């Protein structure tokens, strides 16, 4: 297949770029805003006319959760309108669309892992725009898969792991919330899942939603503690409540994703435990220094 990857300078896009050399049967076109501004319909239409595209993996998103509360129009432009334009172009050119979404489409009031069919109720502008983006895929794409993931991190870009490493080396102690529960996901694992199953995914008519994260459950406090322990950083992590660390955007208190559907749909899938994946990522970060 000829595969267009949008948002290729982000965490997932970069991981796809690194791993795709192991999949020579496909041809990949990597773009970000400089090569293709997906917020402009004409730019997308011209690109599809000039290039053969069988599948789009849309990794592009406005992901600054707190800043989105102020920059609502920009968040909507990237997370909603751009997705609409991509979905329309895919439908016109009979291309498949894979769109990456988020656990923040849920309100966090569940007491069991969220299934794909559970009621969505985002609590932030970021979550609202990502859900609207899902609706654009459902409305305009002929053949599409939406993958919701959670707490994404990588050796590329800005993320919680890198922030903790930086502050952990600069400060004697850090306060981290313990009452928000989810699952960290190493972007390389999601990228490998996508690449390994491009040929096998059930590209049926309509839109199909799947949940993917690494295995296990933790709080941001647990996550931070593990980062310090694996990295042998002597920084005390204090457990605090969310109310003691107010932020502009609300976060779901519980957003663990049920992965039964994607496990059943993809034969032989083995999802790594989040602590093992974290060790692998921290080693890569160390090697890059």
Image (spheres, helix red, strand yellow):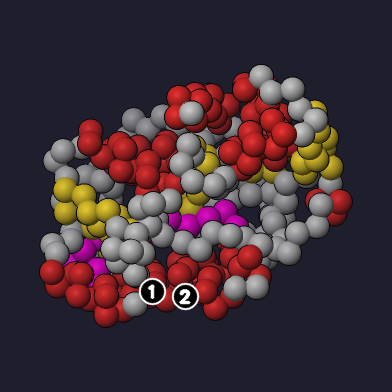
Q: Is residue 26 something one can see in this rendering?
A: yes
Instruction: Please tell me which residue is depicted at 46% across the width and 61% down the height of the picture.
Output: 61
- Evaluate if marks 2 and 1 touch, with contact meaning CB atoms under 8 Å apart: yes
Q: Is residue 113 visible?
A: no
SS at circle 2: helix
Image vertical order of residue 229 relative to residue 220, above or below: above
Apparent side of residue 42 relative to residue 61 in the rendered image (left or right)? left
From the viewer's perspective, is residue 191 above or below residue 135? Answer: above
Residue 185: % across, % down: 52, 39
Decide which of tag 2 and tag 1 comes sooner along the chain.
Answer: 1
- Residue at the disc numbered 1: 39
Residue 94 vs residue 235: left or right?
Answer: left
On the rendered structure, is 53 left or right of 82? left
Given the current orientation, which residue lies at the most extreme right position? 244
Q: Can you tell which quarter of the image residue 120 is in?
A: bottom right
User: Could you classify mark 2 by the number of other residues whose Cα lies within 10 Å: few (under 14), some (14-19), or many (20 or more)?
Assistant: some
Mark 1 secondary-structure assignment:
loop
Q: Residue 99 in the image: x percent, y percent? A: 38, 59
Q: Residue at x 49, y 46 (%)?
A: 157
Residues 289 and 25: in front is 289
Dot label at residue 77: 2
Q: Is residue 289 above or below residue 90?
A: above
Q: Which residues are magenta?
A: 89-104
Q: Quadrant of residue 6?
A: bottom left
**For the image shown, how many numbered marks are present on the structure?**
2
Q: Callout 1: 10 Å neighbours few (<14), some, many (20+)?
A: many
Foreground residue, 41 or 192? 41
What label does residue 12 carry, if any?
A: none
């Amino acid at each position: 297949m000829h595969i267009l990857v949008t948002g290729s300078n982000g965490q997932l896009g970069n991981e796809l770029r690194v791993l795709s050399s192991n999949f020579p049967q496909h041809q990949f076109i990597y773009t970000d805003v400089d090569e293709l501004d997906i917020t402009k319909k004409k730019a997308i239409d011209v690109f599809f006319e000039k290039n053969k595209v069988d599948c789009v993996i849309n990794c592009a998103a406005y992901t600054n959760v707190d800043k989105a509360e102020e920059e609502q129009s920009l968040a909507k432009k990237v997370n909603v309108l751009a997705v609409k334009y991509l979905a329309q172009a895919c439908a016109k050119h009979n291309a498949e669309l894979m769109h990456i979404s988020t656990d923040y489409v849920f309100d966090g009031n569940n007491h069991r892992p969220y299934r794909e069919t559970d009621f969505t109720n985002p609590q932030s502008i970021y979550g609202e725009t990502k859900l609207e983006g899902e609706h654009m895929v459902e409305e305009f794409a002929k053949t599409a898969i939406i993958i919701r993931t959670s707490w994404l991190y990588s050796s590329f870009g800005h993320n919680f792991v890198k922030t903790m490493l930086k502050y952990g080396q600069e400060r004697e102690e850090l306060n981290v919330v313990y009452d928000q529960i989810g699952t960290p996901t190493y972007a390389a694992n999601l990228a490998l899942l996508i690449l390994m199953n491009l040929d096998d995914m059930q590209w049926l008519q309509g839109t199909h939603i799947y949940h993917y994260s690494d295995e296990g459950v933790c709080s941001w406090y647990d996550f931070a503690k593990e980062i310090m322990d694996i990295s042998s950083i002597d920084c005390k992590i204090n457990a605090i409540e969310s109310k003691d660390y107010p932020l502009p955007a609300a976060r779901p208190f519980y957003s663990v994703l049920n992965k039964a559907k994607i496990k059943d749909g993809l034969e032989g899938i083995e999802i790594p435990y989040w602590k093992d994946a974290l060790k692998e990522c921290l080693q890569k970060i160390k090697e890059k220094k």
